[in-house]
Amino acid sequence: MLEFANVTKRYGDTTAINRINLHIPECGIYCLLGRNGAGKTTFLKLLAGHIAATEGRITAEGREVSPSRMPESVNFIESGSPQFNMRVSELIDAAAGLQEGFDVDFARKMTERFELDMRKRYKQLSFGMKTMVTAIITLANNSKTILLDEPTMGFDAVMRDQFNTLLLESYEAHPRVLIVSTHLIDEIARVTERLIIIDKGKLLLETGIDEIDEKAYTLSGPAQTVAPLLKALNCIGKTEVGSMMAAHIYGHRITPPPGVSVDRISLQDFFVALVGGKK
């Protein structure tokens, strides 16, 4: 369905995307994670055909993607994308007129759910409400792939929770590929199915949430007991406080010796350990 084949993107001497190979064969909600400057937005722009790869090949639905071949099946919305200063109801009607298969009922249902005033003009809305309007219009179209870059920026906790519900309802109504770039890791974990983790332009990991739950854990105990265990394990990060050590593991599980506990690791702690932990 979507594929990156040995893709590199350079801006002068800076390599933003470095030899990424990735295959997304089926519908699902994917979370794109990475530190600031890791290459997430560049990744999304490449997939949408907004910019050209320096090397490699990108395909969507079997068709090569580039600025001269921007895929109709992919819809990319950046955080803070502007809209025409029309009433909310007029924006929805305009989107429906421009996009075949636009789900007007879904869009209107969501504006009611989030208590958006259909009579207000776009510039009269708060930043968070502007973002929500854009997200609703994006998710109501019939594109086979939706790319959302930091869609909850400017949202409070309640709006973020509502947005995650919106994602689920959108996917249930129209199963497809939804790729969401975000820093709010544990919040998106309840709706996403798979993770794509990028660090310094390289693909570190593409895996399912269930696999992380199964393979990721923390060993805690006296450093002199924990340290020898790490020789046979894939330790992605560790912290030492006094004589105690907490080591984050991604791989096979072991039966620890007495005095060493095995604890679940949150998705956020897993990400921090993977891209910024003390190795």
Image (spheres, grey):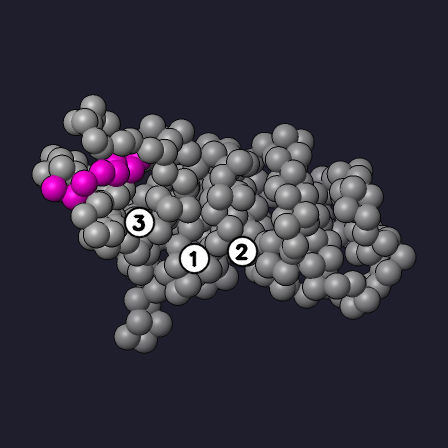
Residue closer to the observer: 253 or 58: 253
Please determine whether, in this image, residue 228 is positioned above or below residue 254: below
Q: Main secondary structure of the magenta part?
A: strand
Residues tagged 1 and 2 counted as in contact (Cβ below 8 A):
yes
**Foreground disc of the pair 3, 1:** 3
Q: Residue at x 28, y 53 (%)?
A: 277
**Amino acid type at mark 2:** Asp
Q: Residue at x 65, y 54 (%)?
A: 156
**Foreground disc of the pair 2, 3:** 3
Residues tagged 3 and 1 counted as in contact (Cβ below 8 A):
no
Residue closer to the observer: 141 or 55: 141
| Residue numbers of the magenta segment | 217-224
* Residue assigned mark 3: 273
| Residue 252 visible in the current orientation | no
| Residue 11 visible in the current orientation | yes
Q: Residue at x 31, y 71 (%)?
A: 14
Q: Which mark is residue 251?
A: none
Q: Position of residue 179 (x, y in %)?
A: 50, 45
Q: Position of residue 74 (x, y in %)?
A: 55, 48
Between discs 2 and 3, the one toward the N terminus: 2
Name the secondary structure under disc 3. helix
